[in-house]
Image: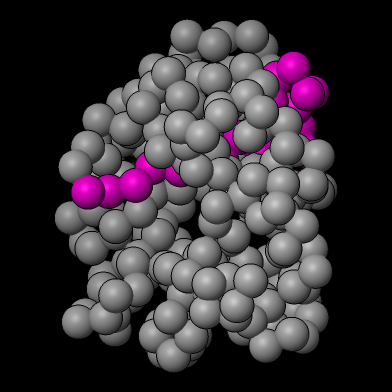
Amino acid sequence: MKSEQIAAMIDHTLLKADGTHQDIIQLCEEAKLYNFATVCVNPYWVPLAAQELQGSRVGITTVIGFPLGASSTLIKAAEARDSIKNGATEVDMVLNVGAMKSGDYQAVQQDIREVAQVCQGNVILKVIIETCYLTDAEKQRAAQLCQLAGADFVKTSTGFGPTGATIEDIQLIRATVGDSMGIKASGGVRDLSFALQLIEAGATRLGTSSGIALVSGGIGTGY
């Protein structure tokens, strides 16, 4: 793949707690320079990103119920609504991992559905299933619930768990949802070789703070 094709699949990410105003401005400048798909920032920074990216083709992803997924559905929907009002074009919500592990699939599906309803229209919804905490059977069920609830993407990881994206998980999710959904690989995507393997396995979006390294052939050290 050409570097510009890879760039167009990258959510250029800055989610660390100590990210500053100037860090977000720099992130946006880099995203415009390299033509990344979106920047991915915490909700507080969405208005600034919208200001910095005005007139560009770079989208704005934000994270909802992040990083634990344990917020109430009401709060997740409100957080998504507020972020969209402030300029977010894509929403990455964290699945309720505890409910998933408890087998409360109805609650998990409803949680996703209510955020999906907020995102109806032109806002893309990605659901982070946090694969590091799930068995293969749970990963499959989680992907199915995302599909049934109206999400656009299944996303592997927050990057705050013990492990991130794996080739095997991407293959498993792709086999589960077929071609009907996008898959975002995130967490530990730091070099071009691994990124290409993830894409070959079925990923259609990459979440990483090492986007510049990926498109320039280097190795990143971040998210």
Q: Is residue 223 left or right of residue 128?
A: right
Residue at (23% x, 63% y) in the render: 87
Q: Is residue 48 left or right of residue 201?
A: left
Nearest the viewer among 24 and 148 is 148
* Residue found farthest to the front: 1
Q: Residue at x 47, y 9 (%)?
A: 106
The x and y percentages for residue 163 are 81, 49
Residue 85 falls left or right of residue 135:
left
Q: Which residues are magenta?
A: 122-139
Colour setup of the view: one colour
Asked if residue 130 lies in the magenta stretch, the reply is yes
Q: Which image quarter is the C terminus in?
A: bottom right
Q: To which quarter of the image does residue 14 belong?
A: bottom right
Name the residue rendered at 26%, 81% in the picture. 56
Given residues 148 and 132, the one toward you in this image is 148
Position above or below: 193 against 142 = below
Q: Position of residue 98 (x, y in %)?
A: 64, 23
Q: Residue 147: x and y, percent?
A: 46, 24
- Kindly tell me whether residue 20 is visible in this rendering: no
Residue 196 vertical placement versus 212 (above, below):
above
